[in-house]
Image (spheres, grey):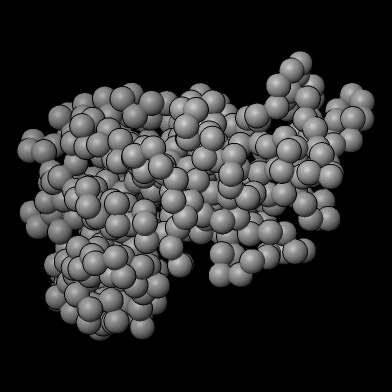
Amino acid sequence: MNWSSLPPWVKEQMAELDTPYFLFDLDQLARTYQTIQDQIQPDRTFFAVKAAGRPEILARLAALGCGFEINNLAELDKIVRVGVKAGEAINSSPITPAMDVRTMYQRGVRHFAFDSRDQVDNLAANAPGSRVYLRLYTSNKGSKLDLSKRLGVHHADAPELLTYAAQSGLEPFGLTFHVGSQCSEIQNWETGIRVAARLFERFSSLDTLNLGGGFPVPYNESVVSLDQINHTIQAALADYFPRRPRLWVEPGRFLMGPAAMIGASVTQVEDRKPVARAVVDMSLFTGLMEKLEFKDGFEYPIETDAKGKNGSYTLLGPTCDGEDVLAVEIPLPRLHVDHRNPRAGSRIFIGNTGAYTLEYSPIDRPHGFNGARVPSVWFLETGRIRLGGEW
């Protein structure tokens, strides 16, 4: 979601909002969901709740027929509050602790992931008879975050674990892997599918392949398209599986990233040379923590309502922390502030901020670290903006 692509009547509504704020476009979310259905054609799509767990988002996805991937009891509570039955959720975390597993099972969750003997013992004790799927290690080369460092079992050790799960009274029905967050290496999907196919040949109980997530969002750089990824997926399925398995996907970032933007006000401008400094009222510590997590090479697209000749700006958040830097030396039209009428100053708009942003924000209180104002949350639907409900 980017400011320049919005129609004038939406921009007029945004001008009345106090900053900082998140604006989620629920119609954009629905369009992205349909793109996944049309291209990959999964048998089930499960939204990774950790990406953005607001009730308005979950309710819209549920209405579209989307399932939900949860990692713990807190995330189960979020989907149940919007009317989703617990049995519609799957738990893809192979490290969910015993008390969460037990309560989730008691409330109706019947699908769990594992990647160790210890988790098999946990599931056998607290979710007896559950349908379970094994998380495989696969290369995360070319991804912004390497998730294989912590989770997933090597394919050579998979047969023993699948056998142990069955002997423990569980029902191994599928495999899953994750190519890494913001994956740019299409080959990772092909490799994961090829390795999974070998295990399908050995274990007749397996009928479901969960491709996880990792589909990239174009932040401020080009990425491989879903169409390119899908071509690789479909070719690999045809090459390695005599019969197509039941296919699941778990998009989080890809669904939510393009569905939101942040609005912020410029509160100070210092026209230094060669790079001017501008301070805004949005902090990394109130929703943009991935800038710190990803480090170099991760930049949100930033626009402004200011006009005129471009200058070079470094954008700082409102705290005194040296890491609270939103962007370094980016070209923007001349920014200005009006200290007598702060609402008349320039605003900046940070695009594609729907995923892994709001979940990091301390939205249960008005201020975060160093007194930084916590953004309000608004939703755009059918051209009208409305305030989000109580969290």
Camera sees residue 188: yes
Left or right of 214? Residue 232 is left
In this view, which residue lies farthest toward the right?
Answer: 273
- Residue 6 image position (x, y, % from top left): 48, 29
Residue 324 vertical placement versus 168 (above, below): above
Task: Locate residue 376: give its quadrant.
Answer: bottom right
Left or right of 15? Residue 195 is left
Of residues 154 and 62, which is closer to you in this image? 62
- Residue 22 image position (x, y, % from top left): 54, 49
Residue 177 vertical placement versus 237 (above, below): below
In this view, which residue lies farthest toward the top?
Answer: 309
In this view, which residue lies farthest toward the front?
Answer: 341
Q: Residue at x 41, y 59 (%)?
A: 54
Of residues 33 and 185, which is closer to you in this image? 33
Q: Residue at x 74, y 17 (%)?
A: 308
- Residue 51 image position (x, y, % from top left): 44, 53
Q: Residue at x 27, y 33 (%)?
A: 35
How many numbered callouts?
0
Q: Residue at x 47, y 55 (%)?
A: 387
Camera sees residue 136: no
Task: Locate residue 243: give its quadrant.
Answer: top left
- Residue 330 image position (x, y, % from top left): 73, 27
